[in-house]
Amino acid sequence: PNDPETVGIGEESTQEPEVVVSNSRIISPLDRNITPTQFEHNAVSPESNLNRDALWLQMSQFLEQGQKQFSELEASHERMRASTASMVKIVKTLQEGHAQLSKASEETNRRLKLVFEVQQHSKRYKHCVDQDIKKLLNVSHKMKPQPQGHITDHPYYRDEIKADAMLVNKAISPSQ
């Protein structure tokens, strides 16, 4: 049952393909067309040394490129970190501004309520003043000089009535 020849018949193999390493040359299962004698011959030939040097050159270039990309990635990460810190500061500033606007809005609403209350008091006061002026006008109209022989014909009362009438006219007429 554990015979390598019979294992996996009719099933997919779960084993990784075998990779052979010999004398700095890697042979993958895809390179099956190379026979072991050719491989051994290539491994000791000057071409093999050139291939090995070229491979080392490629690996060192790849390593340099990887280090350069890693440095760029680190720099990018630092820029992102600085940008994030800047954004956090901006958000905090916006939150503080929002709090100040809320406070100012509350103060404005409070002042608007006071203005409205003052307007209401002013309307009530104006109504009361208008009523008082009407009463004074009625009183002054009733105090007009009566026919001869009435008490208001007396000079003292005439002067008082004139003074009251002047006060009423002054209250009625627009201020100058």
Image (cartoon, grey):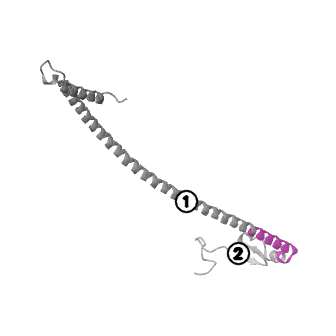
For the N terminus, which image quadrant?
Answer: bottom right
- Residue furthest to the front in view is 155
Query: What crowding class fits label 1: few (fewer than 14 Cα within 10 Å), some (14-19), or many (20 or more)?
Result: few
- Residue furthest to the left in view is 149
**Residue picked out by circle 1:** 89
Within the magenta stretch, is there residue 49? yes
6 or 18: nearer the viewer: 18
Type of the residue with mark 2 = Val
Q: Residue at x 81, y 73 (%)?
A: 52
Secondary structure, magenta segment, majority class:
helix
104 or 174: nearer the viewer: 174
Residue 98 position, x and y percent, is 47, 53
On the picture, is 99 further left or further right than 149? right
- Say how many tags the image has: 2
Residue 128 position, x and y percent, is 24, 36
For the C terminus, which image quadrant?
Answer: top left
Residue 138 visible in the picture: no
Within the magenta stretch, is there residue 67? no
User: Mark 1 to mark 2: distance in Å?
Assistant: 55 Å
Give the residues drawn in magenta, as a range.
42-63
- Name the element at disc 1: helix
**Residue picked out by circle 2:** 19
Task: Determine which quarter of the picture holds residue 19.
Answer: bottom right
